[in-house]
Amino acid sequence: MSTSVARDITSEIIDSLRQPFNAAIEQRSQALEQFKKLGLPGSRHEEYRFTPVTRYLEKNFSWTKNDIEGNIASAVGFLIPQLDANVLVLVNGKFNASLSKVISPASEITITTLSEAIRSQHVAVNEYFNKFVSNESDAFAAMNSAFWQEGIFVHVPENTPVEKPVFILHLNDATSAQVVTQTRILAVIEKGATVSVIEKSDSIGENTIFHNFAEEWIVKEGAHLEYCKIQNDSGKICQVSNSVIHQSAASKLNTFTLTLDGQLIRNNLHILIDGEQCESHFYGLYLLTGNTLADNHTVVDHKKPNSFSNEMYKGIMDGNSKGVFNGKIYVRPHAQKTNAFQSNRNIIISDTATVNTKPQLEIWADDVKCSHGCTSGQLDEGALFYLRSRGIAEANAKAMLLYAFAAEVLEPIQNHTLKAYLDNLIADRLQKNF
Amino acid sequence: MSKGNQVLEEITSKEYEHGWTVNLETDEAPKGLNEDIVRFISAKKNEPEWLLEWRLKSFRQWQKMTEPKWPNVTYPVINYQDIIYYSAPKQKVKPNSLDEVDPELIKTFEKLGISLTEQKRLTGVAVDAVIDSVSVATTFKEKLSELGIIFCSFSEAVKEHPELVKKYLGSVVPMSDNYFAALNSAVFSDGSFCYIPKGVRCPMELSTYFRINAANTGQFERTLIVADEGSYVSYLEGCTAPMRDENQLHAAVVELYAMKGAEIKYSTVQNWYPGDKEGKGGIYNFVTKRGLCAGDHSKISWTQVETGSAITWKYPSCILKGDYSVGEFYSVAVTNNYQQADTGTKMIHIGKNTRSRIVSKGISAGKSQNSYRGQVHVMKRATNARNHSQCDSLLMGDQCGAHTFPYIDVENNSARIEHEATTSKIGEDQIFYCLQRGIDEESAVALIVNGYAKEVLNQLPMEFAVEAQKLLALTLEGSVG
């Protein structure tokens, strides 16, 4: 039975990760109980049907106590060139002050480690830490809440536009042994404030890495968050992330999730629209080759009326890769006049790539406009022929069309340096691999 | 607004039209389920040994299984020992012609608007009437047999065409397929059997009419349709039940088998008793329907209009095994009051160049929950598979829910799959447009709903389309204010 196996590994993990913690003791022990109760999801778990994280953890990790210190002297190669940003670097789940630098003035933004913020009893931490993360429903979220090592706390005061983006870089050093990293983010954007956060992960070394993220984003009345997650780590990495974004009235949200590399990637993005006149746009792009499996589970939960959400996820699958998508739209009773749209489009290049997608609408209010669209197909032969008839070689023509398909997702990104960087990444990738 | 509410009131307070019962003397099995009951049913029907074995095997299988919990419906636990698994109108001898059939029975069907006397019957439809557990009459049998078409009750088929039944029974829905299919395989009482020989185009619509009459009984019928190479058949199914306070279980199995170049069109107008306004009573409709396009160029088309049942839980599916085979699914599911429907389809693309089309229209009103659940699965060798799915939901009132759960699994890179879904209510602008042109609100709603469902209703044979339209109007007219 899958459940008994899952139970086994759950307790193995608990034993290997247990260590003396000094922050958020009470929340940790509660989360541990939830983790024990949930157990790691087996292959029959509806939410993890196509994404065998548990099996991966059983097969590729020895759950003995190990706490490897990362040794990375310079972060230069992992940064986004020319991006003028506040840089925060975590190595193997620990904050690395020498690689980090905060350039925004303290009046604009507070950025500290999460443990520091908890110690200093920051008001926003007391109010929001561990409040929205899905400990009750997702075992990995509960696991993180019980065993997180370090995190970043971001606080933007009222009516403050933060000029420089915040760049959070997760580095894992797996040169000497396997690495298990659990990090958190808590960001509280007060009324009318604006901030842009970019998160990226990279690794060195040949050993396996399991990185478990839990992130809480609180976007208050009229605030604006742009959040970009870049997953282009060629290491032997399995990533699971649980991001919850809580939106209050008239707030605005743009998220981008870009997945280019990794072995097993699971993103749970949960957006709670808890106010009227909110606007949320969330975009995703997954370009997969090799044996990569990327799974995006998104939930947008309309709890209040008169809000708008728009979701667009696109994928191109080559090699033996697998693309999984599940997009839930909930419209609660009373959330009238909701407009919610979703689209998921996939192109399969190779014979052995697969796509599993499940858009899901659940609606309990009548005066709404909701739709989802979902496609899986290949390049338009007419378009291909058009380009070839104009003397463009087949490979180039294909790359051009694929680029056009993919680049649409990046269109709304505001930061030009970031956009150019991502654009290059995609163009480069499509030329090389497809 | 007020007028809309008024009409809604009228409609929701309208009683279920087919809610009466007749006093038929019945022959019943004792309550409960065990191997002896399975043997009892088999013995009652004078079945051959192999069928009894098959039933027992299914029963043992069923005992090992657990009731599925994944559908988006809630209902109290069913006590499977509290159901009568066999109930038949008492009849001394098997009637040779309609004249010998109990006149009470004939009246029952006449009351339902279904005449079993051939000369009075609308020409062009042959009917197999099933009441509680057994088939009572089949019309136009001789005319059909001239063409080599076999259309009879299941028990008759077991006696007269055992080789066919043996070959195809369980070939599309294996006994271990799911909990309710296994239960049905163990205790199925009757149903219809139909075989269309090679190259024959069935000249008339074939139809089965199911009626639950007795109390405390479950209905477990089984339909098996086999279309041999190059043949065509259009098949209709209708159903009603009396109004009773307790819930009754209906767990049927329908198997369609289409050989090379054959086409089967299966239409259902499901109008089981949906329970009263408070959600008391009503039929639990847990049905397994599946078609197999076994041969190349075969086609199976499901059309369903679901208006009844307290709970509907069914997914008429197509397995597109033959190359160039086609599967279609057209559905209108209407829920009102406390009804719950979890319905949809599965299109399994196995053969090359297979095509499928899904059109699902859900309408929810009152406090009902309406879910579409479907799967499009393109297997590895199904090159050039093509699917288009559309599932729309219409919400009437702010206490109902509409849900869609489409699964799209693609393992072949040449497949082209499209899925779209929308949810909305009847637009005020649409109503306003009609009002402007002198169409009153009530008719405007009927017009819009009919237009919304047209794509599906158009697929129904004429006689059924009329009935379906009436049903739709009945359940929904004026539900929007």
Image (cartoon, helix red, strand yellow):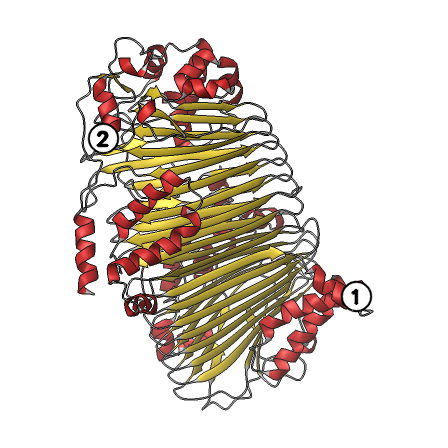
Q: Residue at x 29, y 20 (%)?
A: B86
Q: Which residue is mark 2?
A: B111
Q: Nearer the viewer, residue B184 or B360?
A: B360
- Please name the residue shown 36% across and 80% down the image: A221
Q: Which residue is mark 1?
A: A388
- Determine whether the residue tagged by mark 1 lies in a helix, strand or loop: helix
Question: Which one is in front, A427 or A402?
Answer: A402
Badge 2 crowding class, 10 Å Cα cut-off, few under 14, some 14 to 19, many 20 or more, is few
Snapshot quadrant of residue B143: top left
10 Å neighbourhood of mark 1: few (<14), some, or many (≥20)? some
- Of helix, strand and loop, which one carries label 2? helix
Rendered location of residue A19, percent (x, y): 48, 59
Residue at 32 percent across and 18 percent down: it is B34
Dot 2 amino acid type: Lys
- Pointer 1 chain: A
Measure how far apart labels 1 and 2 are at the Cα level: 69 Å
Q: Position of residue A215 (x, y in %)?
A: 47, 68
Q: Chain of mark 2?
A: B
